[in-house]
Amino acid sequence: MNRVHILNHPLLQHKLALLRDRNTGVKEFREGVGEIAALMFYEATRSLPTETRTVETPLAPAQVQVLSGKKLAVVPILRAGLGMVEPILSLVPSAKVGHIGLARDPETHAPTTYYCKLPPDIAQRQVFVVDPMLATGGSAVDAIDYLKQAGCQSITAMHILAAPEGVRRLQEAHPDVDIYIAAVDEGLNEHAYILPGLGDAGDRIFGTL
Ligand code: PRP
Ligand code: URA
């Protein structure tokens, strides 16, 4: 079963073009990340289960579909993942939020964990891990390892931009995880940045360049 979903949608690609542009400022970059996150979340939740209910419209009873099944949690990988959280919460306001803080070592590019805080009932929730960038894949793999150790069984990963290496690594480490990506680029440079990419997502979201 192919769990990698590349969302080749014109709106997403248009907004991604804005993020890639080096002349895009912090405000527009942050807004663009949020808009893309909401569009991706719309696709990533397409198969959430629903159940039938009846409501009274002003004219007659109507059979309606409402979300059922597991409650949701959004888990950003800090820092850049934070830029994807609020727009998702605007669609699912009752979702809980966990945080996993990972930073890549500039030499080895391996992530180290500096913060983790998850909702106590995370194991019972459908979890959406969000991080704009999937480069070597090390951060996403470690974050999902941690979520599985916490008992999570239903995990979806959402990344705006990926390198082929990162997609392969994440798929191999976690073949049960659905992966949603807006675009897969050519590869990585010697600093493990995605090429052509969009630069450092965290720095561009928070203006720390
Ligand atoms: C970036 C990005 C991912 C990670 C991707 O975070 O937001 O978390 O790198 O790289 P990987 O797939 O090779 O692990 P970074 O470590 O730069 O931290 P930041 O979000 O605080 O800037
Ligand atoms: N992290 C980023 O923010 N950008 C990259 O290209 C790779 C990792």
Image: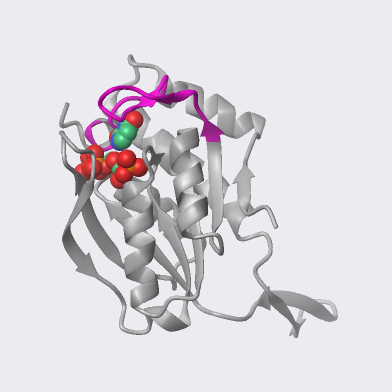
Give coordinates of residue 18: x percent, y percent.
Answer: 45, 22
Q: Nearer the viewer, residue 73 or 194?
A: 194
Q: Is residue 57 visible?
A: no
- Check the image and report above or below for 20 versus 102: above
Where does the image place residue 166, in percent across and percent down from the top left?
Answer: 43, 41
Q: Which residues are magenta?
A: 183-203
**Residue at horizontal 19%, vertical 38%?**
108
User: Where in the figure is residue 56, as x and y percent of width and height?
Assistant: 76, 83
Which of the 4 quarters of the picture holds residue 182? top right
Identify the image's colour scheme: rainbow, by chain, secondary structure or one colour: one colour
Looking at the image, residue 101 sits to the left or right of residue 170; the answer is left
Asked whether, in this view, residue 86 is left or right of residue 179, the answer is left
Residue at the location (68% across, 64% down)?
47
Residue 198, above or below 137: above
Asked whether residue 177 is drawn in magenta, I would say: no
Q: Quadrant of residue 147?
A: bottom left
Closest to the observer, 109 or 162:
109
Magenta segment: does it hold 195? Answer: yes
Say above or below: 105 vs 189.
below
- Residue 22 placement (x, y as % from top left): 33, 16
